[in-house]
Image: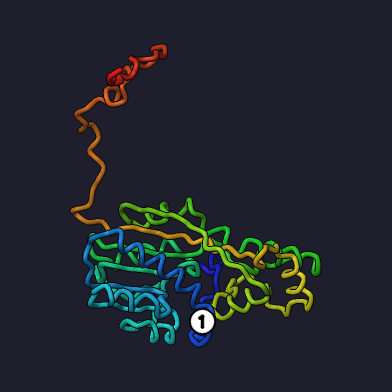
């Protein structure tokens, strides 16, 4: 990818994840909630897996996979400290340059890490390449709508203080793009869905502290590296909405599900192979081109005893 198309500072991200290995316990309940939703998707299939790769698990995914009887679990993270503490065979690696051979895994889970990738379609294609036929891929990442009030408050406060604003909250993918991204990467049976995790902070400053503790501070290349005005954060936090339990924060969680193509997966029927007319199935009359529309036969109802 050319330098002009880069969005994130991956070196800065690695350093932040290194530091977060010692502080992310402060936000463990939120991280656990995300990981549980990812792992729950394994209950939707009876497929048996033997070789798993988990990316960005933060010590919450690999132990759960081993508890499910998966013998081989590799834990990869951009941070060597995160990988070492993740619970699987540790690999310090980059999601943008996967160090695995074709067909290495029959299960890949990416836990809240792919939102920092510069080339998400390319990363998904590499993941599929590393998967054996009929393997399952699951990923969670924040979707558009996450931290939206904070984004608006920071932009408004900085515009008032400086006459302009730099981006301080990462861009997030939209739900409608999820399945298309999977399909573009070559996954079969792609599914994307989203759900909201509602949080509340009595002190809005604690939100910024939690983001820092999790290593989720801004790593945008376009960020303003100057020291921010002293009034910026107080003004932005004061502009956040208030609810009965404090400052509401929404984590909109996008979950991606896809299968690497395999010989036993269901496929669309061959065009022209149907042996039942659609008009018959719908209880209507087939109509030729240019023919005025008709109502067709009334639907048949079975009469019961009167």
Task: State the image coordinates of residue 148 (x, y, percent, origin top left).
Answer: 63, 61
Task: State the image coordinates of residue 213 (x, y, percent, origin top left).
Answer: 56, 81
Q: Nearer the viewer, residue 1 or 115?
A: 115
Residue 187 higher or lower than 217, as above or below: above
Residue 60 higher or lower than 242, as above or below: below
Q: Which residue is mark 1?
A: 24
Q: Look at 33% across and 57% down and name the residue there.
A: 258
Residue 133 higher or lower than 94, as above or below: above
Quick one: which residue is furthest to the front in this view? 306
Left of 8 or right of it: where is 49? left
Residue 121 falls in which quadrant of the image?
Answer: bottom left
Q: Look at 55% across and 58% down and name the residue there.
A: 144
Q: The C terminus is located in which quarter?
A: top left
Q: Alpha-carbon neighbours of circle 1 within 10 Å: few (<14), some, or many (≥20)?
A: some
Left of 155 or right of it: where is 141? left
Q: Nearer the viewer, residue 130 or 34?
A: 34
Q: Look at 77% across and 76% down and name the residue there.
A: 229
Residue 152 falls in which quadrant of the image?
Answer: bottom right
Q: Nearer the viewer, residue 149 or 77?
A: 149
Residue 86 falls in which quadrant of the image?
Answer: bottom left
Asked if residue 1 can be seen in this view, the reply is: no
Residue 108 higher or lower than 77, as above or below: above
Task: State the image coordinates of residue 279 (x, y, percent, origin top left).
Answer: 30, 22
Image label count? 1
Asked if residue 192 can be seen in this view, the reply is: yes
Q: Nearer the viewer, residue 170 or 72?
A: 72
Q: Secondary structure at mark 1?
A: helix
């Amino acid at each position: 990818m050319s330098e002009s198309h880069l969005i994130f500072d991956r070196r800065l991200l690695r350093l932040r994840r290194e530091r977060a290995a010692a502080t992310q316990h402060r936000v463990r309940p939120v991280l656990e909630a995300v990981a549980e939703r990812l792992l729950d998707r394994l209950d939707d299939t009876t497929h048996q897996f033997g070789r798993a790769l988990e990316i960005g698990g933060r010590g919450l995914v690999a132990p759960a996979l081993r508890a499910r009887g998966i013998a081989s679990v590799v834990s990869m993270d951009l941070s060597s400290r995160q990988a070492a503490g993740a619970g699987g065979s540790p690999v310090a690696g980059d999601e943008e340059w996967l160090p695995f051979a074709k067909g290495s895994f029959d299960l890949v889970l990416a836990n809240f890490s792919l939102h920092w990738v510069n080339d998400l379609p390319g990363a998904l294609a590499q993941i599929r390449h590393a998967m054996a036929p009929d393997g399952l891929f699951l990923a969670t990442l924040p979707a558009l709508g996450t931290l939206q009030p904070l984004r608006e408050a920071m932009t408004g406060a900085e515009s008032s203080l400086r006459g302009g604003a730099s981006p301080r909250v990462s861009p997030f993918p939209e739900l409608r793009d999820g399945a298309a991204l999977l399909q573009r990467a070559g996954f079969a049976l792609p599914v994307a869905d989203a759900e909201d995790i509602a949080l509340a902070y009595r002190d809005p400053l604690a939100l910024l502290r939690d983001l820092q503790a999790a290593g989720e501070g801004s790593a945008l290349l376009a960020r303003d590296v100057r020291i921010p005005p002293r009034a910026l954060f107080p003004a932005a936090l004061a502009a956040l909405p208030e609810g009965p339990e404090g400052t509401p924060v929404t984590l909109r969680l996008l979950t991606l599900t896809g299968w690497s193509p395999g010989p036993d997966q269901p496929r669309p029927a061959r065009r022209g192979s149907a042996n039942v007319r659609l008009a018959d199935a719908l209880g209507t009359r087939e109509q030729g081109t240019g023919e005025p529309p008709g109502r067709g036969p009334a639907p048949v109802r079975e009469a019961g005893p009167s």
